[in-house]
Image (cartoon, rainbow, N blue to C red):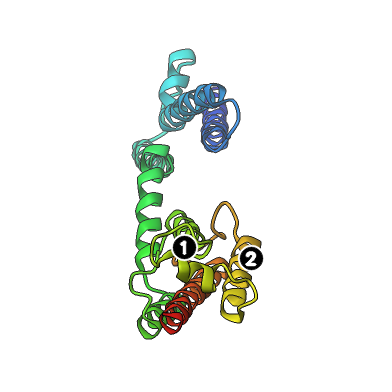
């Protein structure tokens, strides 16, 4: 009877430990009802601990309820004691590994580790990053914006210059070119302005690390060149008219 009860308690402990392990992991990654998930994780830990206790001491707990029979010989007693020592060592090892897994998958550990890995991966230069750096160096875009918000502000400043609201030239120069929509150079600048409006989005495309590599970044770079050309053309026409 004692042996049967010991086996039953051991199986019960194994079931509780597995149930608690799975319950803890399942509720740990639930996005909805965070309070309920927290309660589920705690109950899972309790089940895991109770199952580990039953697995570790099934014979002791069975002896509380049913008296154990005497060993038939000293050899049997020694072998039985050795078997229980090996069993307990295996249970402690397995339960400890499971506890380490549950601890390492907790939010306190996963969140900082995930953040650190993300930062390290983001800092590793990719082939596109090298190509963008080479483009900036060759095209003289060292001061060109790198962030999306700064790029939008730069686009607006260029539009401000093109539409004759700045003070870069005298009024006659604006009338000569920047406000002469029949001038081909000004027309190209206006087309570049329209292209920027067409490709601009509120947020950068996913995975953007340098705006110069996006359609909007390239459009703003072309717009900047067109505005500079229009202003130079306006200055030349103003100088010729003078």
Q: Residue furthest top?
A: 65
- Element at label 2: helix
**Please, what secondary structure does the residue beneath circle 1 have?**
helix
- Which residue is pictured at 38% across the width and 86% down the height? 138
The N terminus lies in quadrant:
top right
Query: Which is nearer the eye, 82 or 10?
Result: 10
Mark 2 crowdedness (10 Å alpha carbons): few <14, some 14-19, many ≥20: some
Question: Where's residue 109, x and y in %?
Answer: 36, 43
Q: Can residue 227 be seen in this view?
A: yes
Give whichever of 130, 229 is nearer the camera. Answer: 229
Q: In this view, does 233 lie above or below 44?
A: below
Task: Tell me if residue 26 comes above or below residue 184 in the rendering.
Answer: above
Q: Quadrant where the C terminus lies?
A: bottom left
Q: In this view, does 171 lie to the left or right of 120?
A: right
Dot 1 or dot 2: first in sequence order is 1
Q: Name the residue under label 1.
A: 161
Q: Residue at x 44, y 67 (%)?
A: 210
Q: Position of residue 153 (x, y in %)?
A: 45, 55
Q: In this view, does 100 lie above or below 37?
A: below
Residue mark closest to the camera, 1 vs 2: 1
Q: Mark 2 points at which residue?
A: 194
Examine the rendering and report whether any part of residue 93 can be seen: no
Gap between marks 1 and 2 measured at Cα = 15 Å
Given residues 77 and 159, the one toward you in this image is 159
The structure residue drawn at horizontal position 53% and vertical position 34%, both measured from the top left corner, is 14
Q: Depth check: 106 or 162 in front? A: 162
Is 10 left or right of 129, judged from the image as shown? right
Numbered mark located on residue 175 in the image: none
């Amino acid at each position: 009877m004692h042996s049967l009860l010991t086996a039953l308690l051991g199986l019960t402990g194994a079931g509780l430990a597995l149930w608690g392990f799975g319950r803890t992991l399942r509720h740990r990654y639930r996005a909805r009802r965070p309070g309920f998930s927290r309660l589920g994780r705690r109950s899972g830990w309790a089940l895991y601990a109770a199952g580990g206790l039953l697995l570790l001491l099934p014979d002791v707990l069975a002896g509380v309820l049913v008296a154990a029979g005497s060993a038939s010989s000293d050899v049997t007693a020694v072998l039985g004691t050795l078997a229980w020592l090996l069993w307990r060592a295996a249970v402690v090892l397995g339960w400890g590994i499971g506890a380490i897994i549950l601890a390492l998958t907790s939010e306190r550990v996963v969140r900082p580790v995930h953040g650190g890995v993300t930062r390290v991966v983001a800092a590793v230069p990719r082939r596109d990053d090298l190509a963008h750096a080479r483009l900036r160096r060759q095209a003289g875009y060292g001061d060109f914006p790198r962030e999306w918000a700064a790029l939008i502000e730069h686009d607006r400043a260029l539009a401000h210059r093109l539409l004759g609201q700045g003070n870069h030239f005298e009024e006659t120069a604006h009338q000569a070119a920047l406000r002469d929509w029949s001038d081909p150079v000004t027309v190209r600048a206006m087309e570049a302005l329209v292209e920027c409006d067409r490709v601009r989005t509120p947020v950068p495309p996913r995975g953007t690390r340098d705006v110069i590599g996006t359609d909007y970044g390239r459009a703003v770079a072309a717009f900047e060149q067109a505005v500079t050309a229009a202003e130079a053309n306006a200055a030349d026409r103003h100088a010729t008219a003078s």
